[in-house]
Structures are given as C-alpha cells and as structure tokens.
Image: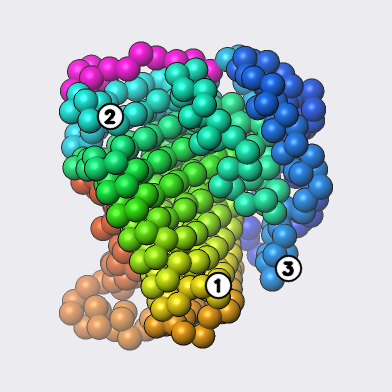
C-alpha cells in the first residue's frame, strides 16, 4: 500500500475523538460573489453563464447540506478542515488532441483518454476510428468555444443536477473545468474511454463537471480513475494526519442515455487520506436504454457520494453497484435516488461496505415509483460488514410507491461481522483463519470489480483492495 493511502491510525481506548462537526460548518472561504465573478472572468465566459453561476451561489447559501429529513442525523463533516483550501487563480491548461497509440500513453485496450488535474487538461487522445465516427472527447472549455449553442443546451439552465441539493449548486456556481464526451446516434464503441483525474495537491480545491451524452442506438463504456497526484509533482501527498493540509474535490457526472443506447460507467476512487471529496452523478435514461454503474470507493478522508437515476423512457433499466473499503477513521456517505417515470422500467441497486478500525459508512437509498410507472421492477440492497468493534455501518433503504401495478418493489439491508459459517467452511478446507477472512472480504466486494469494462483497471482495482487489506492488517499487527 502506498504511503498516501495508508489509513490513519484508529483512536485507541481512552483517546478523545474529534468532535462531530455541524452540517452548517462547511468551512469553505471562497463561496462568495467575488470568487464567482473572478472564476467567470478567468474563463472568459458569456454573461448568461455568469448569471447562472450567481443564481446557483444564492441557492447554495440558502439550502441545508442535507434536504432529506430521513438522513439529516447521518451528516458528519468532522474530518473536513477546508478553511485553507483555494481553487486555482489561473485559466485551465489545454493540450492538443493526439491520436491513440502515439506517445499519448493511452491505457491498453481503451479507445481514448482525457487526463486532468487541478490546473487543467494534461493529456488528451482519441483513436482515429472513433473520431471519424463523430465521437467527441474534449474539455468543457473547448466544448464552449467550439459549439456555444450546444454547450448552453448541455450545461446551461438548471441542467440535470437536483434543485434541492446544496453541493450541486456549489458545483454549478464555481466549477472551473471538466470533460465532455459525445457519442452520436448509431455509434458503438467497442473499447472504453478513460477519464483520469490526478488530484490532491495540499490546499488545492477543484470543482468540475463531466458531461456524457449518448445519442440513440449508441453504446459506450467509460472508466473513471480518481487517484492521488504523484508525490514528485505535489511534493508529497500526505498520510491523512490531523494536522496535514487537505485538498478538496467536488465533481459531477451528468449523463444522458438516448433511446436504445447502452452505457457502462465504472469509477475507481483511490485518493490520498488528505483529500475531501464530494461526488454527484446523475443520469437520465431514454426509451429501452440501459445504464450500468460500477463505483469503487477506497481513498479519501471524507467522501460524500450521491447518485440520481431518472428512468424516463419506457423499458429503461439501470444496474448500480457501489462498494466501500474503509479503514482508520475514514468516513463514506453514500446516497442513491432512483426515480421510475416510464412504463416497465427496471432498477437493480446494490451498496456494500467493508469497515475496519474506527471507519464509518452511511448507505442511504430511496426508490420512487411514480403514478405513470406501470410494471416497474426495482430492488435496493445495502449491506455492511464490520471487521472491528469500533467500526460502524448504517443502512437506510426506503421506497415511495405511487403505482401499485409493479412487477417488484423491494429493498433489503443487513450490517454485521463476517459470517462464522463461511469462516468455518474455509478453515475446514485447510485455509488459515486470516487468509479465510481476506477471501471472504474480497469476495464480498468482487461484484463491482467484475463490472469494470477494462481489464487493466480490473486488475488495478483488485491490487488496490488486496493492498488495503494487507496494509491495514500489517499496521494492526505492528501496533
């Protein structure tokens, strides 16, 4: 395990834990009108976009950080110390497009790559066949300059992000960069596009948006890599200590899937323990379309993740799997909202968390079945595995059903230690107890690994999961 991602030492008996921080104490100091105007000037934006940013800033100031009363008890920001973080005061950098297979160093088996850090785009490549088919991969700045009307249609107005979410409005007000992927009607990409973020410079803040648009009868796979910036660049990414300077990232993924189209989106998050991350993913699905989310959360000191699925078209379906592997005093706050609007839509959503030391996770989900959603089939499962007495997992699945004519509407949840019967079975086959525990834990998390649509990324995720297990248990044994 890298030093950057080594879990912070859990509090021992008798130690005082950091006091719980109120949701109103989000200590960002750049959320004011002057900062918004400076950001807009920096990007040389039109007046309409500045007006939208200012309107979003007002909503950010008005809204609570959690609007759902079921979940307000479970907001905890005690690990976030963001008073000193600042966004960049320079215009984002741009690099020219390269052909995949050149010195762009595109991951093997992929069709394209866009790599970004806090300062802008550092690498951009797309295979010629995809470019000739009309696929577009670019930064948001390039998108706005190339097609102002198209940019306004895709990113302007209220967009797809929910109106009642405080952090969504924070991103609307102060985003500085991001990526745009467009797959035209009838184009089917066999190999995935890689979106790579290298973040975590001490004291740096980045607010970004990713726009993904699939036309009708299209197909694409996207692999998002969220990793700690290299120590040689940042001068050391830190070990998550209480006095270490933190970095801040809030990013959105706004996805439209056209009629008859299919998108697979896998995200591998392995930030350093000095990183605070707020993530928001929202998708709108057309008729007979299909979306598959596979989200892995490993790094970060405090991570809030929200996914909103809107199944608008008849016959649309979504499959979502999100896993957490937490240690030390990491905290993961996962929320999922799935709204069934079309007829005969299908949802299958699963959250899993493995918690060591004094780590915590909140898994919250709400399935809403509207009156028009006849024939809905929807399931929500939330399962936590606690590996120590100090670890805590909370699971809150819920349903709102306005249409009784459903094929299925169900949820399930459980939180507990490793199943003794599974341990007994493996040990009876000659497997040592610690190895047996490791096999059970990694098998518990495997459902998201197999859904990653790039072999090299699958292998990397398995290595990260094993390293996290081995590193944490090595520290525990040493202590």
Q: Position of residue 114 (x, y in %)?
A: 37, 28
Helix, strand or loop under label 1? loop
Q: Which residue is at 67% across, 26% downward?
A: 48
Horizontal and vertical percent position of residue 26:
75, 44
- Looking at marks 2 and 1 on the same chain, the residue that comes earlier in the sequence is marked by 2
Q: Is residue 242 visible?
A: no
Q: Which residue is mark 2?
A: 134
Q: CA distance from mark 1 to mark 3?
A: 20 Å
Query: What span is colored magenta in the figure?
Result: 92-104
Closer to the N terminus: mark 1 or mark 3? 3
Q: Residues within 10 Å of mark 1 (few under 14, many from 20)?
A: some
Real-space Cα separation, disc 2 to disc 1, in angstroms: 36 Å
**Residue beneath label 3, please?**
69
How packed is label 2: few (under 14 Cα within 10 Å), some, or many (20 or more)?
some
Q: Is residue 295 above or below residue 208?
A: below
Residue 328 counted in the magenta span: no
């Amino acid at each position: 395990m890298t030093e950057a991602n080594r879990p912070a030492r859990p509090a021992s008996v008798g130690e005082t834990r950091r006091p719980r921080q109120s949701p109103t104490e989000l200590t960002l100091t750049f959320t004011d009108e002057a900062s918004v105007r400076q950001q807009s000037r920096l990007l040389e934006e039109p007046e309409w976009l500045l007006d939208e940013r200012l309107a979003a800033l007002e909503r950010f100031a008005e809204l609570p950080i959690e609007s759902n009363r079921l979940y307000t008890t479970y907001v905890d920001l005690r690990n976030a110390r963001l008073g000193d973080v600042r966004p960049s005061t320079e215009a984002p950098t741009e690099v020219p497009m390269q052909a995949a297979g050149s010195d762009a160093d595109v991951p093997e088996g992929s069709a394209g790559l866009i790599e970004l850090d806090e300062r802008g785009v550092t690498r951009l490549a797309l295979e010629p066949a995809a470019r000739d088919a009309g696929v577009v991969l670019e930064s948001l700045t390039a998108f706005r300059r190339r097609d102002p009307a198209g940019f306004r249609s895709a990113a302007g107005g209220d967009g797809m992000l929910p109106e009642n979410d405080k952090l969504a409005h924070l991103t609307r007000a102060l985003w500085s960069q991001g990526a745009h992927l467009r797959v035209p009607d009838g184009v089917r990409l066999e190999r995935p596009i890689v979106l790579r973020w290298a973040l975590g410079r001490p004291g740096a803040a980045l607010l970004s948006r990713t726009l993904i648009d699939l036309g009708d009868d299209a197909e694409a796979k996207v692999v998002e890599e969220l990793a700690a910036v290299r120590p040689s660049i940042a001068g050391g990414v830190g070990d998550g200590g209480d006095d270490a300077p933190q970095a801040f990232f809030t990013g959105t993924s706004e996805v439209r899937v056209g009629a008859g189209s299919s998108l697979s989106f896998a995200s591998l998050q392995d930030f350093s323990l000095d990183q605070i991350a707020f993530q928001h993913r929202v998708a709108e699905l057309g008729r007979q379309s299909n979306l598959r989310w596979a989200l892995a959360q490993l790094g970060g000191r405090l991570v809030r993740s929200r996914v909103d699925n809107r199944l608008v078209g008849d016959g649309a379906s979504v499959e979502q799997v999100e896993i957490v592997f937490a240690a030390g005093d990491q905290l993961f706050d996962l929320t999922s909202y799935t709204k069934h609007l079309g007829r005969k839509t299908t949802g299958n959503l699963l959250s899993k968390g493995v918690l060591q030391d004094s780590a915590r996770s909140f898994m919250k989900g709400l399935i809403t079945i509207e009156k028009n959603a006849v024939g809905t089939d929807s399931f929500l499962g939330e399962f936590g595995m606690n590996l120590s007495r100090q670890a805590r997992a909370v699971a809150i699945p819920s349903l709102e059903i306005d249409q009784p004519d459903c094929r299925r509407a169900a949820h399930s949840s459980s939180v507990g230690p490793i199943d003794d019967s599974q341990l007994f079975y493996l040990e009876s086959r000659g497997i040592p107890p610690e190895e047996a525990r490791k096999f059970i834990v990694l098998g518990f998390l495997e459902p998201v690994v197999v859904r990653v649509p790039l072999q090299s990324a699958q292998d990397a995720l398995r290595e990260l999961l094993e390293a996290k297990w081995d590193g944490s248990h090595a520290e525990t044994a040493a202590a």
